[in-house]
Image: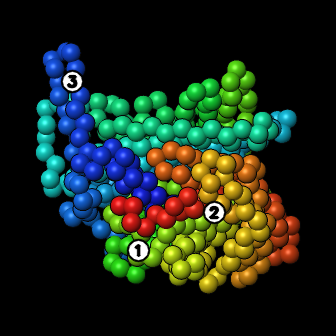
Amino acid sequence: MGRPLRYLIVVLLVAALGAALVFALHRDEGQVTAQLVASADGESAGFARVEGPRPFAFPIDYGPHPAYQSEWWYYTGNLTTSAGRRFGYQLTFFRRALIPPSAQADRPSDWATDQVYLAHFTLSDVGGGGFQAHERFSRGAAGLAGAQAAPFQVWLEDWSVEGTEVGSYHLTAEEEGISIDLALVDRKGPVLQGDRGYSRKGPEPGDASYYYSLTRLASTGTVRVGEAEYAVEGLSWMDHEFSTSALAPGQVGWDWFSIQLDDGSELMLYELRRDDGTVDPYSSGTFVAPDGTTTPLAQSDFTLTVERTWRSPHSGATYPAGWVVDVPSLGLSLTVEPYLADQELNVSFTYWEGAVGVAGQRDGQPVAGSGYVELIGYAGSMQGQF
């Protein structure tokens, strides 16, 4: 699930903007008034549901899918300078439809919209020991935020990712003294997660998303921290997911891993956590071999063993802070350690997402690498939030 149900962030965004989300913008020029309205009960009636596999067609499926209520484009990466200074970054764009397509109507104002966008930008300065997290949200109108397939682009103000040519992307973001300006080149092509891109989250029809990843994006560019600018290179990961659903009853959060190994393979895993402390059977993953061959993993195919924890001085939440990942059928055993303990985002809601280092063995041979881990629901259950 790449992001097991990352669209929930967008649901919380709508809640943050008000249960009956109404923006009124008055401008001196022409006294333009625009409204942006969402239903108070968060109903998903009228939106398409994810109920089985569908064909994917690229490059069209790189773009938005407005028939579905929620969607996100997620980029993370681990970068280093020639001197070995390490950085991690996250840049994620979320789209949330406020009303279904059948209820949408043309309105004369350039500010009128039926979409709201949220973005998160973080930078982990491992060498400097610092972590910054920033959030923006805006309406999908007047050029403030949006997404398109041809040419590919997703943006919120001056945070953006855009296609430059087939398989190549330009990613930029800047906020409060930090910035990234990166060129990404896809080395493997889209990896369809789950059953041909159909990623189930629970037992009920529609408890699912359509989900694919770009698991190995060669990355070069610059990172700026204060007045210092660093030339960097490394690897990035991209997830794109769209859906109309929510957590199944009893699910309170998730632990998600993306791992890129130096033998050319990648691993994605997630565990959905239940309110009774057990792991939900709809947890799953995918192993991507160096040649791009994929192996789907069921919840019974892997184990995540927590080795230690970290208590946040900001939220008071206690998070896992070191793991052993075992996939016996692949001869894979990995130790995963955060590069920085404090990579907690305190934004519309609180969660931990950060860069990690990886070392271990595959088929008896040593492997190492980096990745990203997302921990949701430790600062409060996600159940009943929407």
Q: Nearer the viewer, mark 3 or mark 2?
A: 3
Q: Determine which residue is flagged by label 2.
A: 257
**Type of amino acid under label 2:** Phe
Residue type pointed to by label 3: His
* 195 w.r.t. 88: above or below: below
The mark nearer the N terminus, 3 or 2, is: 3
Residue 59 lies, in percent from the top left, at 42, 51
Residue 248: mark: 1
Whether residue 88 is visible here, answered yes or no, is: yes
Above-or-below relation of 295 to 19: below
Q: Splitting the image into 4 quarters, where does residue 255 fall?
A: bottom right
| Secondary structure of residue under mark 2 | strand
Cα–Cα gap, marks 3 and 2: 44 Å
Label 1: element kind: loop
| Disc 3 and disc 2 in contact, CB within 8 angstroms | no
Residue drawn at (33%, 54%) of the image: 65
- Residue at (64% x, 70% y) in the render: 287
- Say which mark, if any, is on residue 270: none
Instruction: Please name which of the two marks, 2 or 1, marks the residue nearer to the observer.
Output: 1
Q: Quadrant of residue 310?
A: bottom right
- What colouring style does the render use? rainbow
